């Protein structure tokens, strides 16, 4: 199949391009730099160097590719989690406006299927694991709510389109080129004792290895359209996974702080993420996307 990937040089884009090529697809990756284009050529993909905010350039690139499937992995994320609030406006603008250009181009060019990155960690579920039927947490703490509202908009845009729409609700990415890796931003913050366990720490986080996410995304090319939660089998409370992650990256145990201390130092969102986030279920993705997630690597044997 001819596939067009936006955000092709990002954390998910790189293993996704590699897996698409391995499976024999003809791939065009959109990137905004010549360096990213050279990386795509090294994988065996065609490179479309275009700015997502340039609507005409995006449409021209997509039309030239001849692709009938578009995968939207557009993001603009900082190097560390703590910098995310400062980058949120740029990330939101890229996904909504840049992604809007891509979506309109797909409609104009007669694309058959549109696959959209969404969130499997900002879902609302009380006392159970979230799944495809769970709403996004649009009434959560300020930053979480804003992110959830953005994802809700992206999901609605895709599902209400005339194209076949597939939403991939990924868990927190870990592995090479992600925050949650020995060389990643979260590891740096844990080593600096900047990522404490907040009193309670019972919110469950669902992760997924970046390569497992890529494999599931390729499977979504031919699976039935709709929503899929793409996470691993280990939804764990922060109080459990964070100390193990610290040990994995060679850091001392994370400090413990009360919710009041965390509220004062890091704000309402930090408290929400460690006390109210819902883990998610991958039952549908395992059944329909043949998702076979590896065990969260810092849990050990």
Image (cartoon, rainbow, N blue to C red):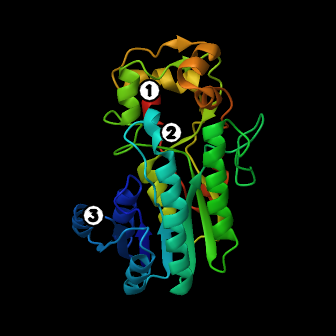
Q: Along the polypeptide, which appears first: circle 1 or circle 2?
A: 2
In the image, taking residue 52 as reference, residue 258 lies left or right, namely right
Q: Count of labels shown?
A: 3
Q: Nearer the viewer, mark 3 or mark 2?
A: 2
Q: Position of residue 14 (x, y in %)?
A: 34, 58
Q: Along the polypeptide, which appears first: circle 3 or circle 1?
A: 3
Q: What distance separates the C-alpha of mark 3 from that of mark 1?
A: 33 Å
Q: Position of residue 13 (x, y in %)?
A: 39, 59
Q: Along the polypeptide, which appears first: circle 3 or circle 2?
A: 3
Q: Position of residue 122 (x, y in %)?
A: 64, 44
Q: What distance separates the C-alpha of mark 1 from that of mark 2?
A: 23 Å
What secondary structure is marked by label 2? helix
Q: What distance separates the C-alpha of mark 3 from that of mark 2?
A: 25 Å
Q: Dot 3, crowdedness within 10 Å: few (<14), some or many (≥20)? A: some
For label 2, the residue is 85
Mark drawn on residue 33: 3
In the image, taking residue 191 as reference, residue 280 lies left or right, namely right
For label 1, the residue is 245
In the image, taking residue 42 as reference, residue 65 lies left or right, namely right
Q: Nearer the viewer, residue 244 or 74?
A: 74
Which residue occupies 71% across, 46% down?
Answer: 138
Q: Dot 2, crowdedness within 10 Å: few (<14), some or many (≥20)? A: some
In the image, taking residue 96 as reference, residue 279 lies left or right, namely right
Q: Nearer the viewer, mark 1 or mark 2?
A: 2
């Amino acid at each position: 199949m001819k596939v067009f990937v936006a955000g092709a040089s990002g954390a998910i884009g790189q293993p996704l391009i590699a897996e698409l090529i391995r499976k024999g697809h003809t791939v065009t990756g959109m990137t905004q730099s010549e360096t990213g284009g050279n990386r795509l050529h090294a994988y065996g993909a065609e490179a479309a160097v275009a700015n997502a905010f340039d609507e005409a350039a995006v449409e021209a690139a997509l039309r030239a590719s001849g692709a009938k499937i578009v995968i939207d992995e557009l993001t603009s994320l900082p190097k560390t989690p703590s910098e995310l609030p400062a980058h949120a406006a740029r990330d939101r603008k890229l996904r909504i406006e840049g992604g809007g250009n891509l979506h309109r181009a797909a409609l104009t060019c007669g694309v058959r299927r549109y696959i959209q990155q969404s969130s499997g960690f900002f879902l609302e579920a009380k006392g159970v694991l979230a799944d495809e039927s769970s709403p996004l947490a649009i009434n959560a703490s300020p930053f979480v709510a804003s992110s959830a509202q953005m994802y809700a908009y992206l999901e609605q845009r895709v599902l209400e389109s005339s194209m076949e729409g597939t939403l991939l609700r990924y868990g927190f990415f870990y592995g090479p080129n992600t925050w949650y890796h020995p060389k990643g931003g979260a590891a740096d913050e844990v080593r600096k004792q900047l990522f404490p366990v907040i009193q309670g720490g019972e919110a469950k986080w669902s992760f997924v290895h970046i390569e497992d996410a890529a494999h599931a995304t390729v499977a979504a090319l031919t699976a039935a359209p709709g929503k899929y939660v793409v996470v691993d089998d280990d939804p764990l409370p922060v109080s459990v996974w964070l100390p193990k992650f610290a040990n994995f990256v060679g850091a001392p145990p994370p400090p413990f702080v009360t919710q009041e201390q965390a509220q004062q130092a890091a704000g309402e969102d930090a408290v929400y993420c460690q006390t109210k986030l819902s883990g998610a279920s991958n039952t549908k993705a395992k059944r329909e996307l043949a998702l076979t997630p590896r065990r969260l690597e810092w849990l050990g044997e």
